[in-house]
Structure formats: structure tokens, C-alpha cells
């Protein structure tokens, strides 16, 4: 579970680059969308932390605000990037996202609501990134 809570996110990023290099255009679009959604997700999390500061389940072991989970936010952003891009690999990313979420709860660094909040932030960041990318595409490439 510690592996899932801590390291799966890095393997997921490597997998996304491999899929973009080896698979089709949908996977390349998903990678671009995911890359653009990461800073949006981080900004959303920082903004939420200005108003909501919840302790972690075991503060003796992990300091910092618990809601929303950064790991869950990024994993959800990766998953929703593949869903929006209609990639056949989206099913794999839902499994990895669930693994990270359950692992973060199991090891005691997040409550379930933190993971659900992270999923919401991930979705919002991908939708925002999609809107921004579409506006740049219309402005500069037509």
C-alpha cells in the first residue's frame, strides 16, 4: 500500500510518456491535456488551502493540510485527460487512480473526503485546461 500511496504517481507519468510515444494521437492529446492540467490543479489546491485546512488522519506522521489530496488530484487529472481524449487506455488510468486513492487512505495520510475532493479538483483542472487549449488553438492556429 505504501508503494501505491507514494510511487504509483511517478510510474503513471512515465507510462503516459511511453503511451504518447508508442500509441496514437489520442494518447498524445491526453498527455498534452494532462501536462496543462497539472499547474491548474496545483493552483486550485493552494486556493482551497486558503479557506479549508483539515488535519491529516495521523498528524504525528504527516504534516500539512489534508483536503484535497494532491496525489488524488493529479491522478484524477491524468485519468480525466484520457477520458476526454477518448483514449482506449482510460480504463488503465481509472485503476491506477483508484489504487492511489485507496492506498492514501489505507496508510493514514488522507480521509475518503480528501480523495473525493482531489478527484473533483482533477476533473476541474482538466476541463479548465481543455477550455484554455481550445481558446489558444482558435486564436493562433486558424
Image: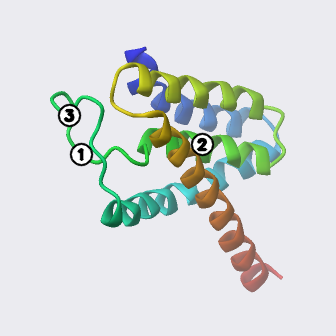
Q: Earlier in the sequence, mark 1 or mark 2?
A: 1
Instruction: Specify the farthest residue to the bottom.
Output: 139
Number of numbered discs present? 3
Label 2 element class: helix
Numbered badge on residue 128: none
Q: Which residue is mark 1?
A: 64
In the depicted structure, whether residue 138 falls above or below residue 101? below
Q: Are marks 3 and 2 in contact (CB under 8 Å)?
A: no
Q: Which residue is mark 2?
A: 76
Q: Quadrant of residue 2?
A: top left
x and y percent of residue 39 in the render?
47, 60
Q: CA distance from mark 3 to mark 2?
A: 25 Å
In this rendering, would 73 be left or right of 77? left
x and y percent of residue 24 in the render?
82, 40
Neighbours of disc 3 within 10 Å: few (<14), some (14-19), many (20+): few
Q: CA distance from mark 1 to mark 2?
A: 21 Å
Amino acid at each position: 500500500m505504501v508503494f501505491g500511496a507514494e510511487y504509483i504517481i511517478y510510474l503513471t507519468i512515465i507510462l503516459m510518456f511511453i503511451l504518447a510515444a508508442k500509441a496514437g494521437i489520442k494518447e498524445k492529446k491526453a498527455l498534452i491535456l494532462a501536462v496543462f492540467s497539472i499547474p491548474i490543479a496545483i493552483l486550485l489546491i493552494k486556493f482551497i488551502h486558503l479557506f479549508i485546512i483539515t488535519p491529516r488522519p495521523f498528524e504525528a506522521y504527516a504534516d500539512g493540510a489534508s483536503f484535497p489530496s494532491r496525489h488524488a488530484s493529479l491522478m484524477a487529472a491524468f485519468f480525466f485527460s484520457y477520458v476526454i481524449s477518448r483514449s482506449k487506455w482510460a480504463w488503465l488510468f481509472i485503476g491506477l487512480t483508484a489504487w492511489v486513492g485507496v492506498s492514501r487512505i489505507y496508510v493514514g495520510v488522507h480521509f475518503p473526503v480528501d480523495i473525493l475532493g482531489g478527484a473533483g479538483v482533477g476533473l476541474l483542472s482538466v476541463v479548465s485546461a481543455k477550455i484554455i487549449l481550445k481558446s489558444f488553438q482558435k486564436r493562433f492556429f486558424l
